[in-house]
Amino acid sequence: MTNEKLNVLLFAFRYAVHRIPTQSLAAIQSELVTNLHRFPDWMLAQMERDLEWNFEMMEMHRDEDGRAGFYDDCEFQRPIWEAIKQEREARQ
């Protein structure tokens, strides 16, 4: 893939992670996980950081019972976050 295509894909991923309702991102996660081996490490690093940020935000917005609100809950993103981390570790 050319750098231009990778950049477009990265921006689309960021938009999906931060803006699209949970069901939409969940629908494309399997496609992303299937193709992680094709992405360069710099792209995976940025994707990993975007997902880490979501989890940090979720932790900051938990209520007194420890529950995350509907719009802050990103647990459905954990599988892709773990897959990205595993792919990056395998390359090192």
Image: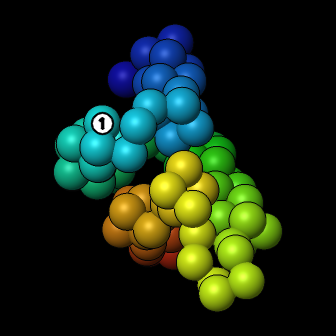
Q: Which residue is mark 1?
A: 24
Q: Quadrant of the C terminus?
A: bottom right
Q: Is residue 76 above or below residue 82?
A: above
Residue 25: x and y, percent? 35, 41
Picture residue at 70% right of the left edge, 75% below the top: 63
Is residue 39 toward the left or the right of residue 19 in the image?
left
Give the farthest residue toward the right.
60
Q: Is residue 36 left or right of residue 82?
A: left
Say which of 22 and 6 sits in front.
Answer: 22
What is the three-letter code of the residue carrying label 1?
A: Ser
Which quadrant of the figure has residue 46? top right
- Crowding around mark 1 (Cα neighbors within 10 Å: few <14, some 14 to 19, many 20+) is few
- Compared to residue 27, the image places residue 52 above or below, namely below
Residue 67 visible in image:
yes
**Outermost residue to the bottom:** 65
Residue nearest the observer in this picture, 92 or 77: 77
SS label for mark 1: helix
Residue at image x 69%, y 73%? 62
- In this view, the residue farthest toward the front is 64
| Residue drawn at point x = 22 percent, y = 42 percent | 27
Q: Nearer the viewer, residue 16 or 49?
A: 16
Q: Quadrant of the N terminus?
A: top left
Q: Position of residue 21 (x, y in %)?
A: 41, 37
> Can I make out residue 84 in this image?
no
Residue 27 against residue 79 in the figure, above or below: above
Q: How many marks?
A: 1
Which of 70/43 is in front? Answer: 70
Q: Where residue 47 appears, x then y in whole percent?
A: 57, 47
